[in-house]
Image (tube, rainbow, N blue to C red):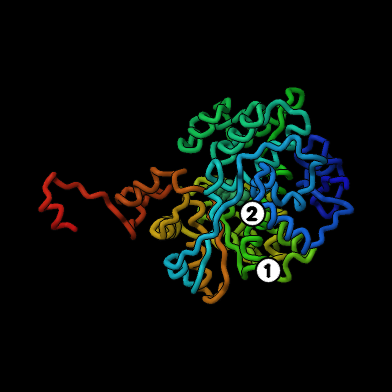
Amino acid sequence: MSSKLICFEPTCRAQFAVTEVLYNCPKCGGLLEAHYPGWNLDPEPVKSVWRARRISNAPLDQSGVWRYREIIPFLENFDHVVSLREGNTPQLAAPAAAQYGGLHRLTFKHQGFNPTGSFKDNGMTCGVAQALRLGMKRVACVSTGNTSASMAAYASAAGIEPLIFIPHGNISYGKLAQALEYGARTFQVEANFDQILALVRGLAEGLGIYLLNSINPFRIEGQKTIIVEMLDQRDWNAPDWIVLPGGNLGNTSAFGKALRELKHWGFIQKMPRLAVIQAEGAAPFYELFRASERRRLEPVGHPETLATAIKIGDPVSWPKALREVEESNGVVEKVSEQEIADAKAVIGKCGIGCEPASAATLAGMRKLTAEGVIERDADVVAVLTGNLLKDPDYIYRYHTGQLDAPDGTRIRSTFANQPIVVPNDPERIASLL
Ligand SMILES: *Cc1c(COP(=O)(O)O)cnc(C)c1O
Ligand SMILES: [Zn+2]
């Protein structure tokens, strides 16, 4: 079987070999998507193979991405795969969060249990495998967030050099710390995000650098396995709704592609509906979805939200994401900083926890059930995208009443849990217990 990259633009549909180094369609600039001509998957035997691999000790089978390699067949062989045992993330029941979200039951699929603490690992193991297959010696991305942390880990594990480019003076310390520790060379450039991306693209050619930004079609293939693993864990009973936060919209694109492919081959009979949640200060996809004619996404010039993983004003994957939300009969919602902060504390108090962007899911569900869009007895899976410890500063500020929204207004600490300062006096402490 030969894999292809096909231009996503309906008026173009140009085809390229997967072994070409491409980021956008060279003809029209459109997004590229992996396709597999002659692909054939028989669900029952494949489901059995996938289940059997769960008790295998082979590294490829232990990976929650490569265990499902039949759904991402873009490599001829697996010589170049570097796995850190990504995926394998739990589904957690959360009754208190369900109640807060207006639901009878709710399950979180927690991608924060990944090796570097976010779902970026599901895609990055594929992106780095592709880089190695292309003979690249270096990989690069423009990001201070979870993409940098993940790329740094996978590239270093693979023995190639990770290069991270970030706008000068725009640093998120938790995630940057991971990138430094995993050995990425990090450049702070005196320019904005778009200027840096153009600069890196220019440098990449000729220097053997492969770009692993969010539009990379192989990262999207890897992220499809989040859905495959979710359905495998549910014995292939598709939920009514899958709720996720939306930033650059790569994950929305990946989830929709996975669901369409699984439905096409007969792994599932029903198409779950996608609910994408954005932060109010960075909600261009919400605005596009609400428009009477969904022609073009209008970028937000200065996106603002404390949920930095979804602080994206011009999401690159919007054309794909729009198709996937429409095809799944899905919805797009937006939530405030206050709603994200309170939802996050509720998820924490379930003993689960997540980073701010992930909590947009519960905040969004609360709105969507109140509006009657999601029914109270619906079977809902929300994807928590990142680990609690990615952003401890936010948490401390919330629980001590010091969290300010980007516009300077103080966020109410509805579920504050303050540390209590006490003297070394057993009676005084006992009186507080
Ligand atoms: C990257 C990221 C997102 C946004 O995902 P997109 O694919 O860009 O929409 C949300 N949450 C976390 C924790 C992330 O790392
Ligand atoms: Zn094209």
Amino acid at dot 2: Ile
Q: How would you rate the neighbour count of disc 1 (Cα within 10 Å): few for under 14, some for 14-19, many for 20 or more?
A: few
Q: How many numbered discs?
A: 2
Picture coordinates of residue 401, whole percent (x, y) = 30, 51
| Location of mark 1 (residue) | 329
How far from the left and from the top, in percent, is residue 117?
53, 44
Q: Quadrant of the C terminus?
A: bottom left
Q: For the residue with label 1, is its CB less than 8 Å from the closest atom of ligand 1?
A: no
Image marks 1 and 2: residues in contact by CB distance under 8 Å? no
Q: Is residue 313 left or right of residue 21?
A: left
Q: Is residue 245 above or below residue 213?
A: below
Give the answer, above or below, for where 364 lies relative to 125: below
Q: Looking at the picture, which amino acid does disc 1 mark?
A: Asn
Cα distance, mark 1 to mark 2?
Answer: 20 Å
Q: Nearer the viewer, residue 230 or 21?
A: 230
Element assignment for label 1: loop
Residue that appears at 65% across and 27% down? 159
Q: Position of residue 347 (x, y in %)?
A: 43, 58
Q: Position of residue 241 (x, y in %)?
A: 61, 67
The circle on residue 226 is 2
Residue 250 makes an appearance in the image: no
Observer-nearest of 253 and 79: 79
Residue 130 visible in the displayed image: yes
Q: Nearer the viewer, mark 1 or mark 2?
A: 2
